[in-house]
Image: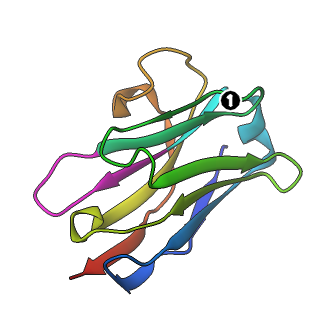
Amino acid sequence: QVQLVESGGGSVQAGASLRLSCTASVRAFSRFFMAWFRQAPGKEREFVAAVAWTGSGTDYADSVKDRFTISRDIIRNRVYLQMNSLKPEDTAVYYCASTAKTVELKAPGQYDYWGQGTQVTVSS
């Protein structure tokens, strides 16, 4: 089984920063990509960022580009999402996800393992 555990969420003021972490089980490293998604109340789950376990490939949603940075630590089996200049519209539950696929990485349906989510709340 691939297990993903997120941490690092919280409540902050607009303009603040947070760093989310996702710890993956060893087997997760056989997957190609890890990603962060988020889901706000009453909205669909949306893509935030993705990173390849090997190489330097990353991708971001336009809404977070230049504010969020995704990275991975192969030794610690972790993926991070550094979130700067947070806005109230970033408020959501953030999920870590894993896939063995290499295309359409912004589609939630491409991911078959998910963490339990961590809440991020940004107040104005």
Q: In this figure, which colouring scheme has been used for the structure?
A: rainbow
Indicate left or right for 52 with 65 as reference.
right
Task: State the residue in front, 3 or 45.
Answer: 45
Q: Which residue is mark 1?
A: 31
Indicate left or right for 113 with 45 as reference.
right
Q: Residues within 10 Å of mark 1 (few under 14, many from 20)?
A: some
Give x and y (percent) for residue 97: 51, 44
| Amino acid at pointer 1 | Arg
Q: Residue at x 68, y 29 (%)?
A: 31
Task: State the residue in front, 6 or 15.
Answer: 15
In reply to whether residue 38 is colored magenta, the answer given is yes
Tell me if residue 53 comes above or below residue 119 in the rendering. above
Give x and y (percent) for residue 120: 37, 73
Main secondary structure of the magenta stretch: loop
Q: Residue at x 37, y 49 (%)?
A: 64
In reply to whether residue 78 is colored magenta, the answer given is no
Residue 108 lies in quadrant: top left
Count of number-bearing discs: 1
Q: Residue at x 41, y 18 (%)?
A: 104
Tell me if residue 32 comes above or below residue 50 in the rendering. above
Give x and y (percent) for residue 9: 47, 75
- What is the span of residues highlighted in magenta in the rendered image? 36-45
Give x and y (percent) for residue 51: 61, 36
